[in-house]
Image: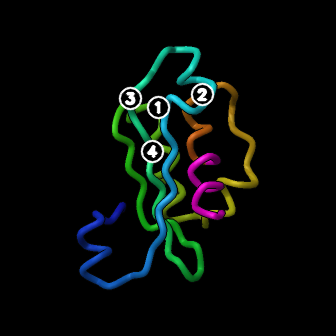
């Protein structure tokens, strides 16, 4: 369901990546999580989510990305309310960073 970065690159799909580091969001600060990140890659043109990569604590995050890869665009992350504080906040942070 989620395409590896190498396949996206081989197919020459232009994409942009937003990165949210766990240490920069509330849940990461509360739990003293200093390592780990979430990458959200979306197509440069129509903002379809191409892939999501979580480097650590995947079980808390990856199910959201898997659902959104086939069902949503980047705007979903920017307009959706996530529980706070959870690592799901990374989706908004990564989407906002990519958007700027």
N-terminal label among 4 and 1: 4
> Does the CB distance between marks 1 and 2 fall below 8 Å?
yes
The dominant secondary structure in magenta is helix
Label at residue 38: 4
What distance separates the C-alpha of mark 2 from that of mark 4? Answer: 13 Å
Is residue 90 rendered to the left or right of residue 56?
A: right
What distance separates the C-alpha of mark 4 from that of mark 3? Answer: 11 Å
> Does the CB distance between marks 4 and 1 fall below 8 Å?
no
Residue under numbered circle 2: 86
Label at residue 60: 1
> Which quadrant is the C terminus positioned in?
bottom right
Query: What kind of element bears circle 2?
Result: loop
Query: What kind of element bears circle 4?
Result: strand
Magenta residues? Answer: 92-100
The residue sitting at 34% across, 39% down in the picture is: 55
What distance separates the C-alpha of mark 3 from that of mark 2? Answer: 15 Å
Residue 50, picture quadrant = bottom left
Residue 8 falls within the magenta-colored stretch = no
The residue sitting at 75% across, 42% down in the picture is: 81
Residue 89 location (% of width, % of height): 62, 38
Residue 86 location (% of width, % of height): 60, 28
Q: Is residue 83 above or below residue 97?
A: above
Structural crowding at the residue carrying mark 1, measured as other residues with C-alpha within 10 Å and reported as few (<14), some (14–19) or many (≥20): few
Q: Is residue 49 above or below residue 9?
A: above
């Amino acid at each position: 369901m989620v395409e590896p970065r190498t396949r996206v690159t081989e197919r020459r799909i232009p994409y942009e990546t937003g990165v949210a580091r766990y240490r920069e969001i509330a849940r990461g600060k509360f739990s003293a999580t200093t390592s780990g990140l979430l990458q959200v890659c979306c197509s440069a043109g129509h903002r379809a989510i191409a892939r999501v990569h979580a480097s650590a604590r995947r079980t808390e995050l990856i199910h959201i990305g898997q659902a959104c890869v086939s069902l949503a665009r980047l705007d979903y992350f920017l307009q959706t309310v996530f529980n706070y504080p959870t690592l799901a906040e990374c989706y908004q942070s990564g989407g906002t960073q990519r958007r700027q």
